[in-house]
Amino acid sequence: MKRALAALLLTASAVLNAGCLWSHGQVDILGTGTAFDETQERFSRLVRWGHWEMASAIVADDQRDHFIEVMRSLEDVKFTDWEILLMDVATGFDTARVEVRLEGYRQSTLMHYEAVMVQEWERIPSVDSEWVVRPDVDAVARAFAAN
């Protein structure tokens, strides 16, 4: 009996930890957490490589124009790295908050800068990617301001 129970617990643990059934400390049968992880990483990589137009497709409609305007003002900036500092996914996978550290330099000054971009994420089931972001690009612009 003990062996059967141990085998059952081991199997249940393996199933929950395999892929989309368990994500961010929650049962995730639909794979919503995995979809969030992929979308958040894609957005951060696009920003890191300076692909503002492509990244803007993931930005919430009400902030898209501002995002593009601010990021275009950073054309002289080359981001060299990014790192997730904090990721907090709400129960039910409706919202998430991510803090991403960006490193880079301005080509005109060769000065090194760092900024933390706070990304507020929301899941909207009726759109293509399901996840949209409201990034704090103003904090990034201030941190990379030419001196």
Image (tube, grey):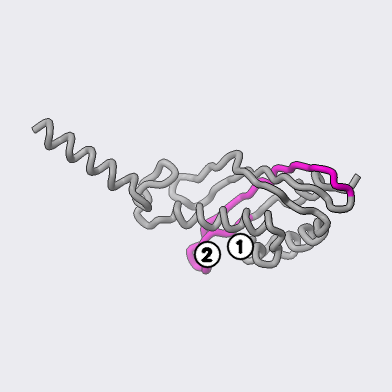
Cα distance in 3D space between marks 2 and 1: 7 Å
From the viewer's side, name the closer residue of 6 and 139: 6
Quarter of the image holding residue 112?
top right
**Residue, disc 1:** 58
Q: Secondary structure at mark 1?
A: loop
Which residue in the rendered view is the most extreme toward the left?
Answer: 1
Q: Determine whether 42 is above or below 1 in the image.
A: below
Which residue in the rendered view is the most extreme toward the top?
Answer: 2
Q: Determine whether 125 is above or below 23 in the image.
A: below
- Residue 64: image x %, image y %? 70, 63
Q: Residue at x 64, y 61 (%)?
A: 59
Q: Main secondary structure of the magenta part?
A: strand
Label 2 Cα neighbours within 10 Å, binned few <14 / some 14-19 / many ≥20: some
Q: Is residue 125 magenta?
A: yes
- Residue 146: image x %, image y %? 88, 48
- Residue 49: image x %, image y %? 68, 58
Q: Is residue 56 left or right of residue 2?
A: right
Amino acid type of the residue that numbered disc 1 sits on in the rendered structure: Ile
Label 1 Cα neighbours within 10 Å, binned few <14 / some 14-19 / many ≥20: many
Quarter of the image holding residue 53?
bottom right
Q: Which residues are magenta?
A: 109-133
Amino acid type of the residue that numbered disc 2 sits on in the rendered structure: Ser
**Residue, disc 2:** 129
